[in-house]
Image: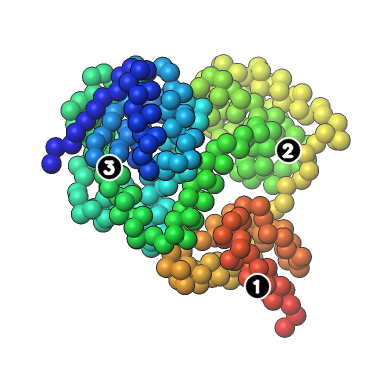
Amino acid sequence: MAIEIHWICDDHSLAEHCQQWRTLPYVALDTEFMRVDTFYPKAGLIQVGDGVRAYLIDPLRVSAWQPLADLLEDRNVIKVLHACSEDLEVLLRLTGSLPAPLFDTQLAAGYLNLGFSMGYSRLVQDVLGIELPKGETRSDWLQRPLSETQVSYAAEDAVHLAEVYLRLREQLSDEKNDWVLEDGAELVAQLRREIDPYELYRDAKLAWKLSRAQLAVLRELCAWREREARSRDLPRNRIVRENALWPMARTQPNNLSALAKIEDMHPRTIRQDGEFLLGLIKQAASLPASEWPPALPEPLPIEASAVLKQLRAIGQAEAERLNIAPELMLRKKTLEALLKSGYPDGPYQLPDSLRGWRRERMGQALLDSLASAGAPS
């Protein structure tokens, strides 16, 4: 069946269509973008499906995005996307807004126990019995004109996404639908939380092995790399490679040849930023002890894995009871944060990342399990 395709290539047309879409109960949204040599994604196409037609918005010809921002923020219209973390970045970059309410069909499939982290083609096959042509995802979405296969691929995505939503929604209980929307809101909130560049050092590989004085250097290096990646619009590893940060903080080279010996240090980085990096290292190394960051906790010991397994089992039992993909229940990072809050003897504290229905249903059971694990036999 041929898909009805409408192109939107100017500001006036976008404004008119957004007004029209705001009268609907839902719209399906998808984006095609390029992100090869840049920090930020470059939008190549925005697709909208209303359940009948596909609308293709050309971001290279539209410049007034406020009407789309208003649609994204209209709480009377559900925005349907699939595995949408990168799509959200594209929309935020273009419009300054993010979708609310957000229904992610990949999450919904997990709540119906169809599978966890399902790819779009497989979901369409499972739910609609339609086999999509092999993707154009790797093709150049900034080229003009787009090829016929690119256009039909993009249009099919938008139309079938709307159909998948309707099928999934009718199978979801109202409670599970609320949970899908709650998780969608959390995805949006995560993107809205501005990452403080000065906190990034905490997640650097092996950072816990460094002294507080060395952490002060790592903190500056990580913060500088993040700010430069954003301002130059380059991938972080094009500024300084990830694996070079830790040895720089540990050995604190004071000349270019010592810097060049750092493992995984790219010659381009030394040419472009070598002198600056040496100055940054020297400056951070001279900070007084009162300004050093606190030492980072060591990773959990191997013995803790049995306790982690016990905590994971609580999520798995609840998943079985609710017929939900177990991977949706308790994230490993959340359980580790819970364990680190009091290991080995307690008391333990539920981490902030355990929110909403998960906290209500499993929070107390997790604390009880830890209390009994710590009780003398």
As drawn, the label of residue 215 is 2
C-alpha distance separating marks 2 and 3: 53 Å
Q: Residues within 10 Å of mark 2 (few under 14, many from 20)?
A: many
* The disc label shown at residue 51, or none: 3
Mark 3, secondary structure of its residue: loop
Q: Nearer the viewer, mark 3 or mark 1?
A: 3
Query: Where, by quadrant of the figure, is residue 362 drawn?
Result: bottom right
Residue marked by disc 1: 369
Between 275 and 162, the residue placed more toward the observer is 162
Q: Position of residue 130 (x, y in %)?
A: 20, 50
* Residue 334 seen in this snapshot: no
Residue 210: give x, y in percent of width and height. 72, 42
The residues tagged by marks 2 and 1 sit, at their Cα atoms, a distance apart of 35 Å
Asked which secondary structure carries label 2, the reply is helix
- The percent position of residue 24, horizontal first and vertical second, equals 36, 39
Residue 47 falls in image quadrant: top left
The amino acid pointed to by label 1 is Ser
**In this view of the protein, which residue sits in the foreground, 139 or 185?**
185
> Could you say where residue 326 lies in the image, as x and y percent from the top left?
46, 64
Residue at the spot 20% in from the left edge and 25% down from the top edge: 147
Residue 187 in view of the camera: yes
Q: Nearer the viewer, mark 2 or mark 3?
A: 3
Circle 1 Cα neighbour tier, 10 Å, few/some/many (<14 / 14–19 / ≥20): some
Question: Which mark sits nearer the N-terminus, 3 or 1?
Answer: 3
Residue at point 77%, 23% (across, down): 283
Give the residue drawn at x 26%, y 50%.
124
Residue type at the position of mark 2: Leu
Instruction: Name the side, left or right, on which 28 lies relative to 350.
Output: left
Q: Amino acid at mark 3?
A: Gly
